[in-house]
Image (cartoon, rainbow, N blue to C red):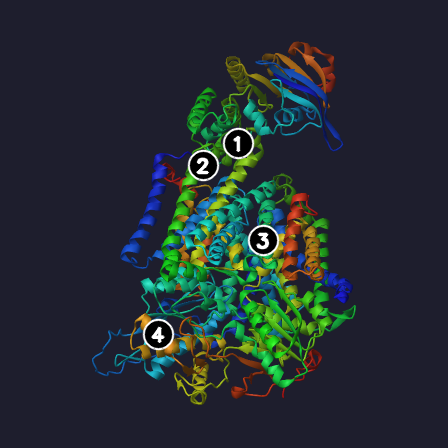
């Protein structure tokens, strides 16, 4: 799709609404059932979907090990902070160092996995990435990297570096801002990609990779580019989230469930669409959150059938279906 | 063709439904009737038919503090996902505690009034992302007065920062990791014995029984909890002069322990200590039996403290030793308080036991008792503080030295570490859990050395 | 401009191309003729880089491109229109054509906007302009072939490889298409190599030169009339008759 | 520990036993993928159902666990049919990944239903047949027989696929659905039967796993096997049932036999590293031979 100004404006408006609500909640307190952390949770899902969409939605490759990027992001940030604390450096050094580590680790992983495994196609690529993810997890546990299975706990160092107040700020507002920024960054990058050569190359790859090569698309480069971008964004999201969970355990951090969630977020909204992750992130996040309160213990029994029903009715995703069946929406929903 | 396949489909669905129905009908204990969804979030224990909210006795003394007409305690529990068993057990305890406070005790004594309590809870699906936003919802939307924790360290770790941010007292009853209280949180109060002290008394027990049994083997799941438990066991072993002859871990998610057990059979230790949770605790016991690996004493973490353990393993569970924060039959009552020279508060162990049985039709477990205890302690702290102010209640916790049905409660004022409570050691004897350590509250004698697997299969019971 | 020197390509034990050499000059139209399995398609794949030859070299404008990957050759100006159109079903006609422009010999010199303009221009040329916002997947087969051509032309090629583009099209359209290609090629100085299996009439009208492949070897080369009259042809096609 | 390496044969036998059940537990996954190109993300849930069927029938009616294999298989067939009609039929022509969501959702529904019906308790039973002795170490018969039965089922499947008309149709659809359709194969019926059969075999393998391990059965136990099944499926070649079985054997042997080897090398956490080794092996195989050991 070619993005018009209307498309971009509509997308940014959606973002602005969520961000605006978040700020409003911060200032005046929760609006009914809408709390700051709920909005951040939604932003988290939106960011996850938006970041993964750059790879999954645009290239059609399924990275079943996507959570490895988030995990490395969490570990990168957390170990940076811990290192700074142990070295007696001021806290913001730790955060800067953590960010650098996050970006280095995730881009390294993306380049290595992308360079090697992206030669595989379809299900083979998917399973190769599962193996990378699980392999990493057991490597961390088996060789006791980053405290191994004991888990890397950051809340202590953070409290000592920034004080209780500072830690609270980090765990809520600052990491919230980071989550929102990642979501926004992922959207902006998606828009930029779609409006330049890159987007066309990725779409050609998704549709027919061999033909794309003959037409002059350097498929390897664009695939690795999308993979790396998507991976780094995932890593940054993990880094932001590490302040919130305050502790990182390998089985949790490398949990394949996050990958499945990311796939659901992309597919539910509509792969390759820009508004898709916003719609699906909001829907998915709020369903989970509110059902947890309405039917504690039974919410998944309501949630899962809804998921199945939606995808059976609209296999191309919500936004995809809207665009397909209501042509008028194509003018402003991308 | 299609029609026939529909017929087959229909037929098999019927079979399926029948099977499901059998399973459901025969296994449904009366108390598992799902709570009516609409009313659960308010947290009132709707499943108890005799539930009556006690009207607050009217003692008309001008209240010095603004007292609400009820005090709401909020928490999340893993009611689905990996820890749903523990979560469900804990919820039953919470309901029992509310009933005791409101109906037996008559409500929290504050500002000259008696105020009933209420619980509000959500299902966190054993997922940390949800824990964060749900705890904030409890604080900001539901405006609960106090928080208690959720089950398991990893989830508690995610919840604590939120409580901290809003300066809410957070009574941690379900995270045993030593690390929680090492983070410098100001509002986290832990009621459990830390993991490092949890299983070590097993070695004290053996020292007192058999000075010749010195060769210990450790097999443990490499998760954070069992790792710390084993560190505690190791250091106690050193002090008491044990030799550790085998010490290996297995990754989370292992159900086949053959490679380790074969090695263990070669090593032939006197004592086997396993660090496990439920599924692996059951599996490892079964496989020790299958492989015929015998020892003078076999201690298994976590799994045996739940009655399901005996139900699943039958006679094979005989003689298995396990640690627990609490067991029904641990009569840590007013006598114990008197001996320590501290106050006793809450239901006596017997009272709690009877009430719980009446409410849920089953014995309380470690998890049920832990959450119930957290709520009862919170009530006491509020009464001591005579205020709903978080700082005041937190200080009251620091000053408390008290015994409840759960045992002693005393924390390190700075960190919130539990230093008063101690874990107990139990043993399955003839189908019943018997407390065998510490001696002053033991309900029976230890059976030692334990029966071999062959003897158990032949039907012998561990009756001392 | 294009030189194929002694190229051999094997697949396992099967020799698909045996020591084939040929030359195509700027602006020239060459038809490569041969029955099914003669190695035509393999030859195209060697020229545009899908396969690497086992022996021999490929030169383009005097540069050895034997080891260049397919996409680099596209940047140099070698474009290909596929026999069985390989549409990108889920994107629009206009975008499909624009991909040709973006990654052809304009590569790196134009942005999306210019590419879309070029796409529009070529779509007008092949009469698909009205359908430019349709999804490619909704086009008919002849329309797809036109799009395939538009996309190839949009890349501003120096050498256009037409992969049996006329097969399966109504005769009237074939003539129209051939005229169109010829006109554009003349205007822009594009050399064209086209693969032909049966439709010999088109060959005569269209090609300056005909190269005949059989069982992987080049057996004939020359002007169309000359080649068609050669008795070898009848042998190759097993006595099959063709319209003159 | 010199005597530990000397019992390596025991480890290998033990690995083959558990591996053959892993293999059977993977066949359903790979069969469905081969024919429908659907990755059943909820695979583990059906294993869990199979385990519960065996557990309940044994505990309630003292039915011989090996006989429960039949009802477990039937329940699987029913579930497979249900899965096909509810979650897959309408998505066959939809974007490939949409089935990922519906199969995931279906798996979650089964798990949550199991939790509501049977509780989240960790259950188990004790059923013993005595032991063989190999190198002086007991090899319980409740582990030997399930492995033998798994092998038998695989042979039966082989016969079904290669010696019957249905099998020919299934294989034809695997190779080329459109071609098969042209040749008069009712592709949708083949899809339907494949899903039913695949899920049936999966629940049957769950029953065998229940006999093998007997303990720790709970609604979420399937997760332990889903990932392993993915890996084994790729190892054997996606879509190749026989390959999956051999892949299972290999993974079983690696899991068991690499532990003493790592111990000998003095690794701090040999068990964890043995799992790491499994995944690394998969990666290497994928890169060298992406179609898997027996893939086309």
Which one is in front in this view, the residue at disc 2 or the one at disc 1?
Answer: 2
Nearest to the observer: residue B208 or residue A328: B208
Q: Are marks 2 and 3 on the same chain?
A: yes
Cα–Cα gap, marks 4 and 3: 45 Å
Callouts 4 and 2 close, C-beta under 8 Å = no
Disc assigned to residue A99: none
Q: CA distance from mark 2 to mark 3?
A: 30 Å
Vertical side of B98 occupied by A175: above or below:
above
Of all chains, the one bearing label 3 is: A
**Residue D149 place in picture, x, y as percent:** 71, 62
Q: Which residue is mark 3?
A: A136
Q: Quadrant of the C terminus of chain B?
A: bottom right
Instruction: Give the left or right position of residue B335, taking residue C161 as reference.
Output: left
Can you tell which mark lies on residue B395?
Answer: 4
Q: Are marks 1 and 3 on the same chain?
A: no
Say which residue label 2 marks: A193
Structural distance between the alpha carbons of marks 4 and 2:
56 Å
> Nearer the observer, disc 4 or disc 2?
4
Please give left or right for residue A251 compared with residue A33 in the image.
Answer: right
Instruction: Give the percent coordinates (x, y) of residue D219.
Output: 54, 65
Q: Which residue is at a point 38% across and 74% down the rendered structure image?
A: B45
- Spatial CA distance of label 2 from label 1 is 22 Å
- Host chain of mark 4: B
- B6 or B255: nearer the viewer: B255
Marks 4 and 3 share the same chain = no
Q: Which mark is residue C87?
A: 1
Mark 1 is surrounded, within 10 Å at the Cα level, by few (under 14), some (14 to 19) or many (20 or more) other residues, namely many
Where residue D82 sits, quadrant-wise, is bottom right
Question: Who's the residue at 46% across and 41% down the image?
Answer: A272
């Amino acid at each position: 799709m070619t993005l018009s100004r209307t498309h971009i404006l509509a997308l940014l408006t959606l973002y602005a609404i969520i961000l605006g609500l978040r700020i409003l909640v911060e200032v005046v307190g929760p609006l009914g059932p809408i709390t700051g952390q709920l909005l951040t949770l939604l932003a988290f899902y939106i960011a996850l979907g938006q970041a993964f969409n750059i790879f999954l939605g645009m290239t059609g490759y399924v990275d079943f090990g996507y959570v490895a990027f988030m995990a490395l992001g969490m570990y990168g940030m957390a170990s940076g902070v811990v290192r700074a604390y142990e070295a007696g450096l001021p806290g913001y050094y730790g955060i800067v160092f953590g960010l650098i580590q996050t970006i280095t680790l995730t881009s390294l992983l993306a380049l290595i996995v992308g360079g090697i495994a992206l030669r595989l196609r379809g299900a083979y690529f998917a399973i190769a990435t599962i193996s990378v993810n699980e392999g990493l997890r057991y490597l961390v546990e088996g060789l006791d990297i980053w405290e191994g299975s004991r888990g890397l706990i950051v809340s202590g160092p953070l409290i000592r570096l920034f004080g209780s107040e500072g830690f609270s700020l980090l765990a809520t507002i600052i990491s919230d801002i980071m989550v929102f920024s990642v979501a926004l960054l992922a959207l902006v990058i998606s828009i930029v990609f779609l409006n330049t050569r890159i987007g066309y190359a990725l779409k050609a790859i998704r549709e027919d990779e061999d033909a794309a090569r003959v037409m002059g698309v350097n498929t390897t480069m664009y695939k690795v580019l999308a993979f790396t971008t998507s991976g780094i964004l995932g890593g940054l999201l993990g880094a932001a989230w590490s302040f919130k969970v305050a502790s990182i355990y390998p089985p949790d951090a490398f949990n394949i469930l996050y990958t499945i969630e990311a796939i659901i977020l992309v597919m539910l909204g509509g792969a390759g669409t820009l508004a898709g992750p916003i719609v699906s992130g909001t829907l998915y996040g709020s369903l989970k959150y509110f059902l947890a309160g309405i039917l504690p213990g039974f919410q998944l029994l309501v949630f899962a059938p809804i998921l199945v029903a939606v995808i059976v009715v609209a296999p191309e995703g919500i936004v995809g279906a809207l665009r397909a069946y209501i042509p008028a929406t194509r003018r402003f929903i991308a | 063709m299609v029609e026939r396949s529909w017929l087959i489909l229909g037929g098999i669905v019927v079979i399926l439904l029948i099977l499901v129905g059998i399973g459901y009908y025969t296994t449904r204990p009366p108390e598992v009737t799902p709570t009516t969804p609409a009313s659960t979030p308010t947290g009132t224990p709707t499943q108890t038919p005799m539930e009556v909210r006690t009207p607050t006795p009217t003692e008309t003394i001008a209240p010095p503090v603004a007292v609400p007409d009820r005090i709401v305690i909020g928490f999340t529990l893993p009611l689905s996902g990996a820890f749903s068993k523990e979560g469900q057990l804990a919820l039953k305890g919470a309901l029992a505690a509310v009933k005791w406070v409101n109906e037996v005790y008559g409500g929290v004594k504050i500002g000259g009034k008696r105020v009933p309590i209420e619980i509000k809870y959500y299902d966190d699906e054993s997922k940390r992302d949800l824990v964060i936003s749900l705890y904030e919802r409890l604080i900001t939307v539901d405006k609960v007065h106090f928080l208690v924790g959720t089950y398991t360290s990893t989830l508690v770790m995610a919840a604590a920062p939120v409580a901290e941010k809003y300066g809410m007292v957070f009574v941690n009853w379900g995270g045993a990791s030593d690390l929680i209280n090492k983070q410098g949180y100001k509002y986290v109060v832990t009621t459990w014995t830390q993991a490092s002290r949890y299983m070590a008394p097993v070695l004290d027990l053996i020292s007192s029984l058999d000075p010749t049994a010195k060769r210990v083997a450790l097999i443990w799941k490499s998760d954070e909890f069992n790792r710390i438990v084993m560190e505690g066991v190791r250091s106690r072993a050193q002090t008491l002069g044990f030799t550790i002859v085998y010490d290996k871990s297995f990754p989370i998610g292992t159900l086949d322990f053959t490679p380790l057990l074969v090695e263990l059979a070669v090593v032939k230790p006197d004592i086997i200590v396993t660090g496990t949770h439920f599924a692996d605790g059951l599996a490892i016991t079964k496989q020790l039996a299958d492989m015929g690996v015998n020892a003078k004493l076999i201690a298994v973490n976590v799994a045996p403290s739940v009655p399901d353990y005996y139900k699943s393993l039958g006679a094979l569970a005989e003689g298995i030793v396990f640690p627990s924060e609490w067991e029904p039959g641990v009569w840590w009552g007013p006598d114990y308080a008197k001996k320590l020279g501290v106050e006793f508060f809450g239901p006596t162990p017997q009272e709690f036991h009877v009430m719980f049985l009446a409410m849920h039709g089953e014995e309380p477990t470690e998890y049920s008792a832990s959450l119930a205890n957290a709520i009862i302690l919170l009530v006491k702290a509020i009464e001591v503080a005579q205020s709903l102010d978080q700082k005041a209640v937190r200080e009251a916790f620091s000053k408390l030295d008290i015994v409840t049905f759960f045992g002693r409660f005393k924390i390190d004022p700075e960190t919130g570490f539990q230093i008063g409570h101690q874990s107990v050691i139990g043993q399955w004897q003839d189908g019943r859990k018997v407390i065998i350590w510490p001696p002053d509250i033991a309900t029976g004698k230890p059976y030692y050395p334990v029966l071999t697997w062959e003897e158990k299969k032949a039907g012998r019971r561990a009756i001392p | 401009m294009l030189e194929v020197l002694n190229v051999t390509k094997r697949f396992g034990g099967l020799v698909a191309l045996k020591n084939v050499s040929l030359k195509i000059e700027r602006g020239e139209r060459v038809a490569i003729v041969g029955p099914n399995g003669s190695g035509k398609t393999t030859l195209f794949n060697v020229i545009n880089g899908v396969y690497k030859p086992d022996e021999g070299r490929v030169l383009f404008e005097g540069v050895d491109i034997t080891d260049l990957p397919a996409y680099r050759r596209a940047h140099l100006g070698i474009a290909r229109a596929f026999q069985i159109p390989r549409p990108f079903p889920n994107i629009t006609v206009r975008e499909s054509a624009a991909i040709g422009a973006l990654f052809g010999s304009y590569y790196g010199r134009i942005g999306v906007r210019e590419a879309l303009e070029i796409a529009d221009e070529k779509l007008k040329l092949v009469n698909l302009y009205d359908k430019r916002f349709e999804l490619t997947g909704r086009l008919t087969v002849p329309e797809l072939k036109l799009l395939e051509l538009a996309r190839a032309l949009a890349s501003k090629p120096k050498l256009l490889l037409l992969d049996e583009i006329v097969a399966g099209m109504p005769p009237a359209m074939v003539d129209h298409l051939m005229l169109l290609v010829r006109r554009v090629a003349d205007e822009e100085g594009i050399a064209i190599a086209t693969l032909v299996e049966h439709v010999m009439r088109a060959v005569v009208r269209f090609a300056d030169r005909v190269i005949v492949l059989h069982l992987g070897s080049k057996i004939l080369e020359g002007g169309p009339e000359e080649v068609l009259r050669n008795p070898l042809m009848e042998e190759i096609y097993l006595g099959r008759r063709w319209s003159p | 520990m010199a005597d530990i390496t000397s019992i390596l044969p025991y480890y290998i036998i033990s690995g083959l036993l558990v591996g053959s059940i892993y293999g059977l537990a993977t066949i359903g996954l790979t069969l469905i993928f081969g024919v429908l190109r659907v990755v059943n993300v909820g695979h583990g849930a059906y294993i869990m159902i199979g385990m519960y069927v065996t557990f309940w029938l044994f505990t309630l009616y003292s039915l011989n666990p090996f006989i429960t294999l039949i009802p477990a298989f039937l329940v699987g067939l029913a579930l497979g049919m249900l899965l096909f009609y509810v979650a897959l039929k309408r998505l066959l022509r939809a974007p490939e990944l949409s089935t990922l969501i519906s199969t995931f959702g279906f798996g979650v529904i089964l798990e949550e239903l199991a939790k509501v019906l049977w509780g989240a308790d960790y259950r188990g039973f004790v059923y013993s047949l005595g032991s063989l002795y190999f190198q002086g170490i007991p090899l319980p018969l409740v582990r030997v027989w399930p492995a033998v039965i798994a092998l038998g089922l695989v042979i039966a499947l082989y016969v079904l696929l290669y010696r019957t008309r249905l099998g020919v149709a299934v294989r034809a659809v695997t190779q080329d659905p459109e071609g098969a359709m042209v040749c008069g194969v009712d592709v949708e019926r083949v899809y339907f039967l494949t899903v039913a059969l695949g899920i049936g075999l999966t629940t049957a393998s769950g029953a065998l796993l229940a006999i093998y391990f007997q303990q720790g059965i709970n609604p979420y136990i399937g997760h332990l096997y889903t990932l392993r099944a993915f890996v084994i499926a790729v190892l054997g070649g996606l879509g190749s049932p026989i390959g999956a079985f051999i892949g299972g054997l290999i993974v079983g042997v690696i899991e068991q036999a690499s532990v003493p080897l790592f111990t000998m090398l003095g690794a701090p956490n040999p068990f964890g590293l043995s799992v790491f080794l499994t995944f690394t092996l998969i990666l290497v195989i994928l890169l060298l031979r992406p179609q898997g050991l027996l893939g086309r």
